[in-house]
Amino acid sequence: MQQPRLLTVVLNYRTPDMTLRAVEAAVRELVDLRAEVVVVDNASGDGSFEKLTAGIARASWGRDVPVRVVASPVNGGFGAGNNFGIRAGLADGSRPDYVYILNSDAFPDPGSIRCLLTHLQTHPDAGFAGSYIHGPEGDAHITAFRFPSILSELEGSARFGPISRLLRYRAVPIGVPSVTVRVDWLAGASMLMRMDVLDEIGLFDEEFFLYFEETDLCLRAARAGHETHYVRGSEVTHIGSVSTGMKTWARMPTYWFDSRWYYFSHNHGRFYAALATLAHATGGLLWRLRRLVQSKPSADPPQFLRDLLLHDFKALTGAPPEKRLAVRATPVRIAAKARAEQPR
């Protein structure tokens, strides 16, 4: 039987040196597979495209697996950038059987990609499979989750033991599973996706600039009957927050609130989204009362609850946002067209 064809997409935004490290690590794991890599420069505007192109051309590993660099004309965020790479497709215009997305600050450990591929090949009910993620020092990252809900908003914001114990099966983070297990959704640092599933449900929803896009994609897959699996045997080293700068945020950016509201309102309705915000506010006020009484340190970014309530009040009372690009029912069979439209 012929091996399936695998397209790996690595998204770059102003981190060309680290992206080249990620691509090199991916190529090492793809050598014995029918695979290609597409590196998407997400309109970095800092010379990244040229640095990536030159770096791959002179690297010895650049000849082991076909690697292309393509330039997105706009920075539409994580989902849009990965969509651009998926639409670029394989170099010969054929359709891949699987798509593997890898963060530019993530480095596949030995056997990691093949492990995901074997898992999807042997588990037909699974549409997506993701890796166990750990930091450079071996510290495990929490990347397996339940879908957000009204009760999870209360549990997460209250930070109160009795509430968390009562709602332990509603909390969004699952922890770090010790074995391969079905989950609701996975962080997209290292995720293999079945192309047939993407053809059926569409690509990432580009209304999300950053955050909640993987949650939404996995929810659409689940509603179509496709499972998402956390594969413990696939291990990937991940630095985290390099392109987003999240670790240095003074306040939560507006696009985080936009994504959260859109996820709830689009998938569950505006009334549900409002109740989710009310639940979060209730838990948040309880937490702030405990902070006052027990002199606990702050756990939220500055003015987080105020920003959340103000944003969601405006979203609830205003017109629903229009989608920038419909992706739900668009089959991904346009690789040649996408390449013809690439900027020169």
Image: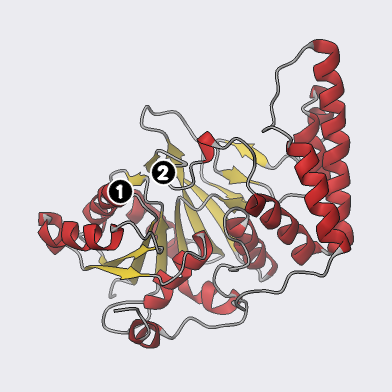
Task: Give the class, few, some or many, for how many residues have Cα within 10 Å of label 2's Cα (few <14, many ≥20).
Answer: some
- Image quarter where the C terminus lies is bottom left
Q: Please, what is the three-letter code of the amino acid marked with disc 2?
A: Gly
Residue 183 location, x and y as percent? Answer: 61, 50
CB atoms at circles 1 and 2 under 8 Å apart? yes
Counting residues from the N terminus, which is met first, the one under dot 1 or under dot 2?
A: 1
Q: Secondary structure under badge 2? A: strand
Q: Please, what is the three-letter code of the amino acid marked with disc 1?
A: Gly
Residues at marks 1 and 2, CA–CA distance in whole angstroms: 9 Å
Task: Give the class, few, some or many, for how many residues have Cα within 10 Å of label 1's Cα (few <14, many ≥20).
Answer: some
Residue furthest toward the top? Answer: 294
Q: Residue at x 60, y 35 (%)?
A: 250
Residue 66 location, x and y as percent? Answer: 21, 68
Q: Secondary structure under badge 1? A: loop
Q: Which mark is residue 39?
A: none
Count of numbered badges drawn on the protein: 2
Judging depth in this view, the residue of 326 and 50 nearest the camera is 50
Q: Residue at x 49, y 56 (%)?
A: 129
Residue 179 location, x and y as percent? Answer: 51, 40
Q: Residue at x 18, y 56 (%)?
A: 55
